[in-house]
Image (cartoon, coloured by chain):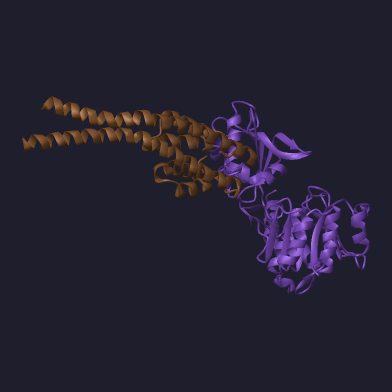
Chain colours: A purple, B brown
Amino acid sequence: MEKLKDEKITFKKNNRINLREVNFNEILEILPIKLRNLLKNISPDLINEIEEIRLRVDKPLIINARGQDYFVTNDGKATRIQHKIIMVNKFDVDTSFQLVTNYSAYALEEEIKNGFITIKGGHRIGISGKTIIEKGSVKTIKDVSGLNVRISREKIGCGEKIIKYLIESSDSIYNTLIISPPQCGKTTILRDIIRLISNGVPQYNFKGINVAVVDERSEIGGCYNGVPQKDIGIRTDILDGCPKAQGMIMLIRSMSPRVIATDEIGRDEDIYALKEAINAGVKFITTIHGDSIEEVCRRNNISELIENKAFERIIVLSNRPKVGTVRKIIDYKRNRVLNDMLLFDRGDFFAT
Amino acid sequence: MQLKIVICGILLFSSSVVGYLFSLRYSLRVKQISYLQNSLKGLETEILYYSTPLPMAMQKTACRCNKSISGIFDETFRLLNSRNGYSIEEAWKSAVLKQINNTSLTKEDAEIIIGFGKDLGVGDKEVQKSHFRFINILLDEQKNKAVYEQNKNGKMCNRLGILLGLAIVIILI
């Protein structure tokens, strides 16, 4: 066991994967004083592994860490038994909601419509409650009854294994499509690839080039007040919360990017904008939900792009044996598989 | 004799000044309600058209509005910006209670202003808009009351001061 631990550490060092430390104060700041003081008492070991904090009206405060749910006792200890535990009331949820929105729910109408708000540090707060519908679409959420604080941890360095397959020349990359089922880490990989393209990769003699990102769901950059809270590189411009199709065309016109990156294309107008980008001579990296190329090809609009060989590289991700596994990297023009082994990205070593 | 006249003069003058000071409270209240309405209008603009976050909007309003009531906005800004987990309602209430003594506003005014904090910043812009309209109506009402009291009590205080001075002078003579 001891040996295994050691090995893991050396792997981490070798691959320069580094989990950026989470500033827990940023998270405490959105909780009411009562809960704040309790959470301060929880052991730092657990705090470092917290993934979610859930506040629901008249339900216990639940912390999700290490894949398990923990309650918090009256004296601020994490426990798994429902005995003398802290309950969250309406006032706590309301106050937290005010703190999350910086007392300005009116300024975040769009975010509330989408059901989540990004706070400083790139963490996302999911909101549930009573929705108000107008003309068939959600207008706002009132009477907030549940908040889910999702703590975001970057995996810096997870794209380094992949980037060498994407570099075309010292200042250009291949058009790339990342195919992945949900929850396989495609946004994480995309973010790190963006960072590498933007910063440059000296070991492959690749200079950094301008990247423009359309971040429709604020997932790539985790922007707070328009400033990305995650490391997406020094030559990256980001349009936060903008519809992809519109954003791509805006960026091509305004920021003269060499590469455009977006998450989860699928609608017809996205494809149209991608074609526009190809015509403008801009390279792009994008992701799509799916299990394999064949499955993606069943969608009419995408299959057209794939058949025209618009994508020069296709990366297929999988969550087996582990989240973030790179199953295949395909050179689609020459129709050949480039990598001969599974690559892990969230994990930090090659699987043989 | 001359000394007597001088002393009587001083007595008359000071009692009418006291009367005037009493009446000033009424006229200041009218003015301050107007100031408050104006600054709330400014706050509304910040919220509805610039989508400024509330703490910043409070600070801006505090800078712009009349000194006599700017303390309320300034104090709220300070409390909200400290990020100590106050809700808007709490911060606004404690700011109003703390600053109300520096103004000529009455307890009744204070209660209305405190009530305004309950829905401030909550909900979308439409909610905010109707909310501001509502407080404006309430303050208009208060202003009418204040004007009425100013006309009634303010003038009375003024006259009472002079008359009281005269009465004392007559008694002394």
Residue at x 11% of width, y 35% of height: B5
Left or right, A216 with respect to A278, comes to left
Left or right, A120 with respect to A165, comes to left
Viewer-side residue, A54 vs B164: B164
What is the x, y in percent for residue B6? 11, 37
Q: Quadrant of residue A77?
A: top right
What is the x, y in percent for residue A73? 58, 31
Residue A316 seen from this side: no
Left or right, A345 with respect to A56, comes to right
Total labels drawn: 0
What is the x, y in percent for residue A93? 61, 34
Residue A153, compared with residue A232, is above or below; it is above
Q: Quadrant of residue A226?
A: bottom right
Residue at the left extreme, as displayed: B1
Residue at x 42% of width, y 34% of height: B97
Residue at x 15% of width, y 29% of height: B169
Residue A229, compared with residue B1, is above or below; it is below
Viewer-side residue, B81 vs B7: B7
Viewer-side residue, A295 vs A326: A295
Q: Quadrant of the C terminus of chain A?
A: bottom right
Residue A16, compared with residue A68, is above or below; it is below
Residue B108 seen from this side: yes
Left or right, B102 with respect to A215, comes to left
What is the x, y in percent for residue B104? 38, 35
Q: Quadrant of residue A205?
A: bottom right
